[in-house]
Amino acid sequence: MKDQLQAELKEKVKEGVKPSDLRKLKKSKSDSDLPKSKTQSLKHSKSTNEIPLAPPTPTTKTKDRELQEKTAELDNSLLARYEVVKQFGVIHAKLQKIKQELNENVEQASDELISQDEIITKLRKNQNRTQLRIQELESDLNLAQRLAQVRKVPYPNSDNNLDYLKYAFYSLLTVSFLI
């Protein structure tokens, strides 16, 4: 039985026959249902293209014209979209360039601000030191002015000092006699 089925399959299987076609053959039990080969089916499809078409009617002409108009509209729309996308690409490139320049400017400004802050800090420290030095100098000046005023007051004369010494000596002598 198995040999018989294989022999039957070999008879039916030919170039261009698919297994699904064999199943159809089992159902129909005729070889005419199977396609002969791929080349035969191609020849058959060419012959269907050679069937003459009906002459164009006014409705088909208007439909052809409408179809051509719609195609032209779609082409114009497609070209317009292409131009918009192209312009978008150009604008996008410009925006990226501007964004990069902006980032560079922000970074440069940030660096400048940091350096200026450092300079301001140094200047404030110098200002504080200078103010302390000014206060020290003012206190020294006040002290010097007081000394100058004290020097303006006349010192006792040496002659007057002798008089004082005389009085001191007399008082000592007097005290010594009394004792």
Image: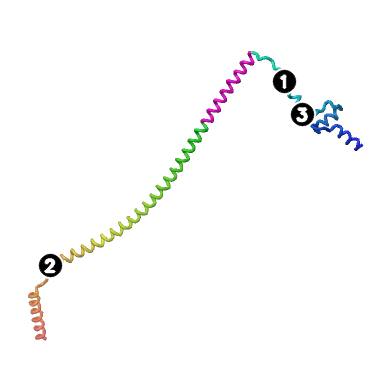
Residue position for label 3: 39
Three-letter code, disc 1: Glu
The residue at 11%/69% (across/down) is 154
Left or right relative to 53: residue 140: left
Crowd around label 3: few <14 · some 14–19 · many ≥20 (10 Å):
few
The secondary element bearing badge 3 is classed as helix
Among numbered discs 3 and 1, the one appearing first in the sequence: 3
Tag in front: 3 or 2: 3
Check the image and name the residue furthest to the top.
Answer: 58
Residue position for label 2: 153
Q: Nearer the viewer, residue 43 or 117?
A: 43
Residue 68 is a magenta residue:
yes
Among numbered discs 3 and 2, the one appearing first in the sequence: 3
Image height of 85 relative to 101, above or below:
above
Displayed quadrant of residue 67: top right
Tag in front: 2 or 1: 1
Looking at the magenta stretch, what is its main secondary structure?
helix
Displayed quadrant of residue 69: top right
Disc 2 from disc 1: Cα separation: 143 Å
Image height of 170 relative to 111, above or below:
below
Q: Position of residue 93 (x, y in %)?
A: 48, 38
Q: Which residues are magenta?
A: 58-83
Residue position for label 1: 50
The residue at 56%/28% (across/down) is 78
The residue at 31%/58% (across/down) is 126
Q: Position of residue 173 (x, y in %)?
A: 9, 84
Crowd around label 2: few <14 · some 14–19 · many ≥20 (10 Å):
few
Q: Position of residue 128 (x, y in %)?
A: 31, 58
